[in-house]
Image (cartoon, rainbow, N blue to C red):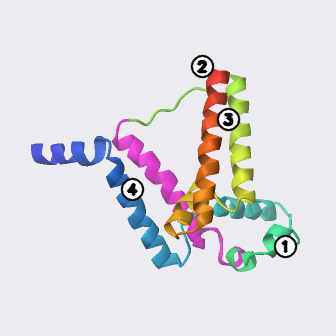
Amino acid sequence: MKTVTKFMQKKIHDPWTYFKGALLLTLLQILTLLITKNAWGVTTAFIHWGAWIYEALGGDVSSWAYFNTRPYRQIYANGFLKDPGTLRNIGIILGAALAALLAGQFRLKRIKSFKQLVTAAAGGLLMGYGAGIASGCNIGAFYSGIASLSLSGWIFGIGLFIGAYFGAKLIIRLFV
């Protein structure tokens, strides 16, 4: 029993090295390409979610330019839970929660101020908008772009670094 506990401590509770994390992400990227025939992406599924919700409320996105340039009609016809991006995102959310629970790091935190709430909401909306107009987030445009040997992935990475630098400065100014 003690051996199992040591194994669990080392493999689940203790932090992984960057090399192990990079190796796992690489294997997941390869599996994603093999199974779905598409690069790993996150934000496109969120765009689908918004369109599904909008259409469920009586709206119609078929006339919007964004949805006319991609084969979305088939995605909507197949349904929410048959979309590979949706399944991956649900897996990422549940996997992150499980990892935090197993590592003893899961915490529900109280929002400190209205300013923090507004800043977080604005930041999330801007990130989503930016990922939409950039045709990808840090996973789809950066990680999958570099893994596909695309110059655009490296260019996105430079922009990501610059944005993270100034974003960190802004957070320090507002909250520290």
* Mark with earlier residue (4, 1): 4
Asked if the stretch drawn in magenta spans residue 159, the answer is no
Of badges 2 and 3, nearer the viewer stands 2
> Which callout, 4 or 1, points to the residue nearer the camera?
4
Q: Mark 3 points at which residue?
A: 120
**Horizontal and vertical percent for residue 64?**
86, 68
Q: How far apart are marks 3 and 4 (CA)?
A: 28 Å
Q: What element carries label 3?
A: helix
Q: What residue type is labelled 1?
A: Ser
On screen, residue 58 versus residue 9, left or right, reads: right
- Label 3 and label 1: CA atoms lie apart by 31 Å
Q: Is residue 54 visible?
A: yes
Q: Which quadrant would the C terminus be assigned to in this image?
A: top right
Q: Which of marks 3 and 1 is nearer the N terminus?
A: 1
The residue that appears at 65% across and 35% down in the rendered structure is 166
Q: Which residue does the numbered mark 2 point to in the structure image?
A: 176
Disc 2 to disc 4, how far (Cα)? 31 Å
User: Circle 4 is placed at which residue position?
Assistant: 22
